[in-house]
Image (cartoon, rainbow, N blue to C red):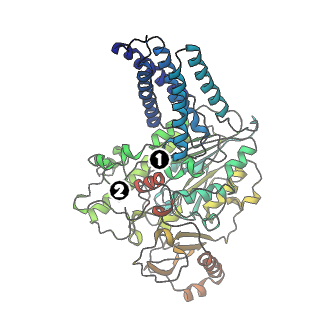
Amino acid sequence: MTLPPQPLHTLPCVLTGSTVGALSSGLLLWGWPTTPGVAWRDFEQASLLGIGAIAGAVLGALLGLGSRRAGPTGAAVAGLIPAAIWGWVPAVPTQGRVLIRMDPETTSLLLGAALVAWGLIRLTRRPAIHAGIALFAAAHMWFIWPSAAPSPPATTVGPSVLLVTVDTTRADLVPGFGGDLEPADMPFMNAWSTSTRRFTHAYAPTALTGPSHTSILSGQHVLEHQILANGRTIPEDTPWVPERLHAAGWFTRAWVSAAVLDARLGFHRGFRVYDSKFDRRLVYGHPLLAWVPRRRVGGTGFTRADPHTVDQVIHSPSPDGRTFTWVHLYGPHWPYTPDPVHADALGVAPTLDLGRDGPVPLNHKTDLSERTRNHAVALYRAELRTLDDQLKRLLTSIPEETRVVVVADHGESLDEHGLFFNHGRLATAPSTRVPLWVRGPGYPPGTDDRTVSLHQLAPTLLHLADEPHEDMGVALHETSADAVSVSVSSAAVFEAADAPHLHSLGDLASVAVRSGQMSKTASVWHAPGWSQLSTNPRELWGADDVVDDTNATDSATATVTQIETAWRHAIATPLRGSAPASEDVDAETKAALEALGYIEGQ
């Protein structure tokens, strides 16, 4: 006759199941596969560990009921079930953090498998059967565990290449790049740049992080790869520098600092190590935390602080052989929250007190007081000084012989053309002219005034790696003196219903074409205008040097002809897949874009 369970007998089962569940889940997560796109953040690891402990406790209690002799053993086996469930995750064909985005069919499959295992354990009280089930689960996890893709053996001979991309850094506030504004204080970069080639007329194809980085690593202009909004997945057939280097035997690794470069969007391709672990919006951008002063305006969720990113890089083991490293820093992006020491040096508070002005909607319609504008501009300058500190930590930690490219992905508008503390909408110089430094063979120290575009960095990186690059385009050092650059934004992403449409721009919301010291710019909010960059470097409409097409043609026929040809081609290019982010991305990506201020109307 079976005796009724004793209440106290359930407690050891609960403790056993909880302990085994927590330990097995913890060990599993400690050895989680490095397959890009399924790496867990610290918060997620802690959550899974807690779920494992709770699930083990519950299952342990259930197995303890009615089982006096085999209860603890069954509880121990039950504690393995959560780990077995986690073990299925790498086999689920869903990119990204699959437990968050898992489809109903997969969820049902995992729950069904757990119930079957629990049923088998519950039917028998023999420890040998329990152990067999545990071994079967472990064996299954072993076979489905994704193995790392075979990598060509890295050689110990050859250079290492470092690509550093910094977010939202306009060229005219960086020392040594020229302009009509006083540059920010950046003592380290000012000194370090003397050993580099500085390109003073480098332009981003578009002023958004994801599309610009796609151009940097693919060698394709945005009009070619047609990714003109953040949050879009990069097609697998897009040429990709990291894949080329990985196939050639390089050790490729990356650390990025914003969710718009997440592995799940395809930026991880070709990287053996891709670290895209960000703080979640619940930590920094959630409305419940609106009382925190430095997080009151805008959202910095889905980002990682630059000091943390640099810490990860400089404390990571140095791999053997040729190494390509990409580091992305996010610091100067809105909301501006610089190191308080640097804000104090400029005589402003480290956070923007908007008072009655309210939150800045980050667009071109904001009516702000002069005090608020000046405070925000000072904070941006302090952000550049803070960025200088992190670049110093990073660039002084690498071997002297490392070949280096440091570049901004786009700039920032600080009240030019009525656009406040934002970018993306307009293609004018404040949003698209960026600082660009190159150190390596073929790039003697000095200033280079040729007009270049960031999609030329892909062949440049391959050149610095001593790899063939001709099929990826023209490297920076191969640029002709009369080169033309084109910067655009998509009307589907940015066009407002009440835009005056002063000029037909096709599928574009804005366009800028430049060659030498001349440029032509327009947007759906502003009529076309010509600028002489030597006297009007910010391409301010209404400036004295702005001329109409006829006068421009009379003064520089050849240059104007090139600009007009590129202008017509850009406007005539049909765009695809550039609908607003609020319409065609998944909920998780939409939340990240909204928190970062990239979805209009939020």
Marks 2 and 1, how far apart in space? 15 Å
In the rendered structure, the answer to whether residue 392 lies left or right of residue 351 reads right
In the image, 438 versus 154, the foreground residue is: 154
Taking 588 as reference, is 68 above or below it?
above
Residue at point 37%, 14% (across, down)? 4
Number of numbered discs on residues: 2
Q: Crowding at label 1, few (<14), some or many (≥20) Cα neighbours within 10 Å?
A: some
Mark 2 crowd level (few <14, some 14–19, many ≥20, 10 Å Cα): many
Question: Residue 302: image x %, image y %?
Answer: 44, 47
Quadrant that contains the N terminus: top left
- Say which label, 2 or 1, has the lower sequence index: 2
Residue on which the image places disc 2: 378
Say which quarter of the image contains residue 362: bottom left
* 10 to 355, vertically: above or below: above
Residue 595, above or below 248: below
Q: Quadrant of residue 447?
A: bottom right
> Which residue is farthest left?
356
- The percent position of residue 550, horizontal first and vertical second, equals 56, 89
Give, as a three-letter code, the residue at label 2: Ala
Residue 315 seen in this snapshot: no
Which residue is disc 1 drawn over?
Answer: 388
Image mark for residue 504:
none
Q: Is residue 42 above or below residue 202?
A: above
Label 1: element kind: helix
Residues at badges 2 and 1 in contact (C-beta under 8 Å)?
A: no
- Residue 7 percent across, percent down from the top left: 34, 15
Q: Give the residue type at disc 1.
A: Asp
Position of residue 581 in the picture relative to residue 420 (left or right): right
Q: Quadrant of the C terminus?
A: bottom left
